[in-house]
Image (cartoon, rainbow, N blue to C red):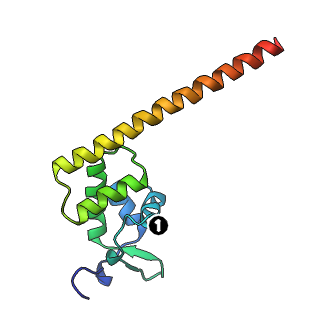
Amino acid sequence: MTDGEADPNQLMPAREVALRLGLSIATVRYYDHAGLIDERYIGQGADGKRAYDDVTVTRLRALIEACGGAGLPIHEMRTIAAALDDGTLTDERQLELLQQALVRLDYEVDRLGAVRHNLAAKIAQLQERDG
């Protein structure tokens, strides 16, 4: 094994990663397929399925903490993950990224409020027509 690669003797299945992080197995697999788990720390378990090492757990825990449990979209999580990986995720950078995410979320809330208003108006219009 070279430095920075998964140790085949220390690999664990997705269910173990999920258990350690309090996530569902589906979420771990989703993060894997979305590219949030560094390929260097993924190997093949005895059952032939993808397996992960302790670095994966540590990295995902740091990523989840950095995202503040904010339910960020994957592309925003990738940005934070990249900053974690290259060592540029200072408190200031994290604040900047989370503030940008909040602005986008506020915009989306406003947009959905307008959609909801239009939908409610259409429902009221149809109810008046039938009533």
Q: Residue at x 35, y 43 (%)?
A: 101
Q: Nearer the viewer, residue 115 or 55?
A: 115
In the picture, residue 5 is in which quadrant?
bottom left
Q: How many marks?
A: 1
Task: Locate the N terminus and report the quarter of the image it occupies.
Answer: bottom left
114 on left or right of 125 = left
Q: Is residue 131 above or below residue 2?
A: above
Q: Nearer the viewer, residue 16 or 38?
A: 38
Mark 1 lies on a secondary structure that is helix
Residue 63, position in %: x, y?
29, 56
Residue 104, position in %: x, y?
40, 40
Residue 102, position in %: x, y?
34, 38
82 on left or right of 124 = left
Task: Locate the C terminus and report the quarter of the image it occupies.
Answer: top right
19 on left or right of 85 = right
The three-letter amino acid code for the residue at tag 1 is His
In the picture, residue 19 is in which quadrant?
bottom left
As drawn, the residue found furthest toward the bottom would be 1
Q: Residue at x 32, y 83 (%)?
A: 8
Q: Is residue 95 above or below residue 52?
A: above
Q: Return the residue at label 1.
A: 33
Q: Residues within 10 Å of mark 1 (few under 14, many from 20)?
A: few
